Image: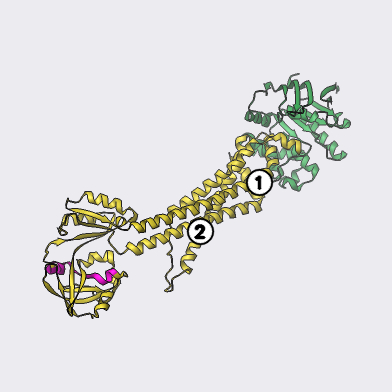
Chain colours: A green, B yellow
Amino acid sequence: MDNILELKGIDKIYGDKVKTQVLFNIDLNIEKSSFNSIIGESGSGKSTLMNIMGTLDKPSNGDVIINGTNTTNLSRDEMAELRNETIGFIFQFHYLLPEFTVLENVLMPYRIKNGRVDKEAIDRAKYLIDKVELSKVKNNLSTNISGGQQQRAAIARALINNPSIILADEPTGNLDSETTDKAYRLLREINDEFKSTFIVITHDKKVAEKGDRIIEITDGKISTDIRRNI
Amino acid sequence: MKLAWGIALRFLKSSKGQTILIVLGITIGVSVQIFIGSLIDGLQVSLVDKTIGNSSQITIVSSEREQYFEVDEELLNSLNEDEELTAVSKSLDSSAFLTLDDETYPVLFRGMEFKDANKIYDFDDKLTGGKIPSSNGEVMLGKDLVENLELKIGDTFELITPEGSLEEIKLVGEYDLKVKAINESWVLSTIKTSEDVFDKEGQITAIETQVKDIFAADETAVRIEKGLSDNLETENWKELNEELLSGLTGQSASSYLIQVFVLLAVLLGIASVLAISVVQKSRQIGILKAMGIKNRDASLIFLFQGLVLGIIGSILGASLGIGLNLVFSNFVTNPDGTSLIPFYLDYKFVGISILIAILASTLSSLIPAIKSSKLDPIEVIKNG
């Protein structure tokens, strides 16, 4: 199967005077349309790894190849464009824009990509909002809905540009277990329907086990890499 | 572009208190600027009008020792057709002595055509008794001279010309030009009377004019002088009123200085509030950047905010400033009810003030815009 994302010899070192190495020589290939979990204790470097995979952070050494494009030499604007078109983010804290409604928030990556919104985009946004069961509150300001709803809105937003990769950092970190289950069922459904690649980062083993492949990070290195056969 | 515009408007709308505060700052700044600017402009215009409004602004006189010159109808016609001139009046003047009860008084005897001279001196309005001289031998005197000599309308008296001849003339009118020196010395009559008294038929001593743009009087004078024959030259009010002019220049300079400082204060105000707003909105900018917004758009968000604030603030400010001017000219009055400083509005000045304010507020949002463009999304994602 084709790789959508390749990491080659990634090191990440923080600090100038006191150097702290967080990631050590990580090599990792992620296959197209797969559903992956990255698990690790807090401080293991998994969030740093995700930020590097999402081009939000640059590795100290090594290459990040997304969809065949090596990101090492891209300018900040080229990186932004790549991010906008190929990667959808779902963060632990939803990061919705408080000034905008749920629908506007979901449409924001589309507006960034195309500059304006056409009827087709609105229909797609409405479909996604319906999918995450937020149709009733779609015109509320994003601050006027519950935490679970906000997280689901963030999921819909991550999907609007139909990205090939969805990076989720503790997407259910502050949700109760019932809502968590619901959210994961939703992510799996989307994975089936849109064939997007999912990389979900979590510290929760039970959550990680919902993935097809579980990659464990310990002290900045890949300690285990298990593929489940479905 | 459109996206940055939309986000900028939404940011402004969602923090209404802050938006109102900045707009208020710009409004007050611009209104003070326009109020002070217009006030001083109005003051200057009324000062100039009071000083030279009823006098010749460009005068054509003889350039030779001989002060008399032949009337040139062609020249008069071309002056009358000149777009820049609003009044053209020829006069035949000579010094003379007025004698009464063995006393003599030095006077300036001026013969003019009142139909033309009225456009400059407005005698119809300045007449305080009797009538304007119309037939031969009739003159009018200034209020102060009439009082000094204890004359009455209808009295006759004698005039000694420079040649020594004695002419009898009749007082038919009394004027008040509000300048004592003129009121005490000018004896006004028709040009025909003057010709007869001084025996200078067909000759004049000056062509007096008024111009549309009084501050361009010197340039107009130079242009007119080019078309004159060698024995003639021009004098304009500017070269005769240097002190007034330097006073006006000083006033303008202080007015500009005040305006610059007001503008500077407004500029710093906008820059600081917008700088704070970048800090407040850094989370949102970080999210937008994570979603792929380009640095250019991220900075445009703040430039557009500055632009919108500048447009709203300066238009409100201009209206307020004009309103203040209206109030001032209507309610701050002289004892006789006329306004102390008449209402004066220079649309060009208001337009330029608005443009400068808009430009300044956009410019002052440049710092926050650059800050926004440099913001790294990872900072926001990491720190929540």
Q: Is residue A188 above or below residue B32?
A: above
Nearer to the camera, B140 or B87: B140
Q: Which region shows up in magenta?
A: B181-197
Q: Is residue B217 above or below residue B380?
A: below
Residue A217 found in image quarter:
top right
Label 2 Cα neighbours within 10 Å, binned few <14 / some 14-19 / many ≥20: many
Residue B378: image location, x then y, percent: 72, 34
Disc 1 or 2, which lies upstream in sequence? 1
Residue type, mark 1 in image: Ile
Residue B290: image location, x then y, percent: 69, 34
Q: Can you identify the residue that label 1 sits on?
A: B276
- Relative side of B305 to B212, left or right: right
- Relative side of A116 to B192, left or right: right
Query: Callout 1: residue from which chain?
Result: B
Write the residue at 74% across / 44% down.
Answer: A135
Marks 1 & 2 on one chain: yes
The disc placed on residue B321 is 2
- Relative side of B333 to B194, left or right: right
Residue B139 part of the magenta segment: no
Question: Where does the N terminus of chain B fall, quadrant-wise?
Answer: top right
Residue B194 found in image quarter:
bottom left
Q: Secondary structure at mark 1?
A: helix
Q: Is residue A49 visible?
A: yes
Nearer to the camera, B37 or B14: B37
Query: Callout 2: residue from which chain?
Result: B
Nearer to the camera, B38 or A67: B38
Nearer to the camera, B290 or B36: B36
Residue type, mark 2 in image: Gly
